[in-house]
Image: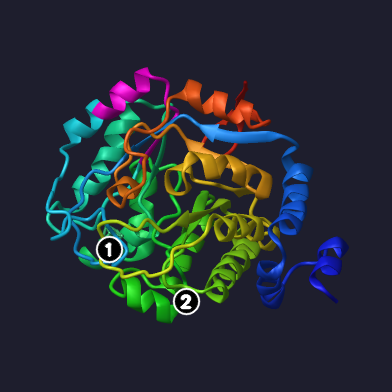
Amino acid sequence: MDISTKLESGRRLEYEDGLALYELDLFTLAKYANAKRKSLYVNKAFFNVNRHINPTNICKDVCKFCAFSANRKNPNPYTLSHEEILSSVEKSYKNGIKEVHIVSAHNPDTGLEWYLEVFSKIKKKFPSLHVKALTAAEVHFLAKEYSLTYEQIIDKMVEHGVDSMPGGGAEIFDEKVRKRVCGGKVSSKEWLEIHRLWHKKGRDSNATMLFGYIEKKEHRIDHMLRLRDLQDETDGFNAFIPLVYQRSNNYLRVKDFLSSTEILKTYAISRLMLDNIPHIKAYWASSTINLALIALEFGADDLDGTIEKEAIQSAAGAKSADGMNIKDFIDLITTSGFVPVERDSIYNELKTY
Ligand code: SF4
């Protein structure tokens, strides 16, 4: 059965189908991915009003694609105090944020409580704020550093007020590629196990995939299928977020960067392969806002949020350091022919503009 016939039959796509999708021309692929998105959300484009905080960039690990951690290409180590973090949250809360998204590097000098207590402090002061925090890579780091099990760290996260987990640290699951680009951090199996344990607590999370560096299409499809398998089991992922590799200030030597066509195809293929993950996020901080808006025609339905401050993608060259004004966000979505829908962190619809 050729890939178009299979898509039209509505049957679940397998590994070879994913590779065949990359061979379709862009607009044929868009037709199928867009039809799937429309069948779920018509012309809604989701976003949230959130604030990103990256409390420290001092890291025990050395991922070759990373421009955020303090190293010789980025000699700017910092660690925020809890007071500084709370003050940033307070300012953003007054601006109407509903979520604070907290992701750090793997700092061995702070102590476990520095990582965790800030969540309970935020919850105590701003009980309505959704705390999305600690990637599976951070959970792994904290478990190893403080000789605890993943479950013990997860219990502490719940106890300290973490509501959901971000999807970072997944990078690419293929073991050979992973060893080359980030061999020291959480393994693929461990990343999936941590999300499995988190979902078993009845909690939600997201999942990312970093692409556009040394991985191949085969690895992307494999990555999506490993996530799809876990989602079949736990149903705990809200969104899949393909992150476009940023090229500046890191240790990877990448000769050929992805074309916009390949990026858009990857969003579209994500929508078609991941038939059990409800949302495909075109994270504008990694793709650029213009491409993220176009991605809405290629299967994506979510753009992430206003962010306010962004340190990870922007360290590697993305134009995202100051986030996005909500009015601009709404105008851009509207002029692209979509209806902006503000959502909360677990995709309850809050307001349609
Ligand atoms: S990606 Fe994360 S774990 Fe890896 S070096 Fe950067 S901050 Fe550290």
**Residue at (86% x, 61% y) in the render:** 8
Determine the secondary structure under disc 2.
loop
Q: Position of residue 31 (x, y in %)?
A: 77, 52
Magenta range: 88-101
Q: Is residue 253 above or below residue 126?
A: below
Name the image quarter holding residue 123. top left
**Quarter of the figure with residue 261:** bottom right
The residue sitting at 78% across, 48% down in the picture is 35
Whole-percent x and y of residue 257? Answer: 44, 63
Q: How is the image coloured?
A: rainbow
Q: Amino acid at mark 1?
A: Phe
| Number of disc labels | 2
Residue picked out by circle 2:
174
| Residue 212 falls left or right of residue 280 | left
Q: Quadrant of ligand 1?
A: bottom left
Image: 182 above or below 200: below
- Does 319 sit left or right of 198 as displayed? left
Residue at disc 1, CB closer than 8 Å to ligand 1: yes
Outermost residue on the top side: it is 94
Q: Which residue is mark 1?
A: 141
SS at mark 1 in the image = helix
Give the residue at x 63% y 35%: 45
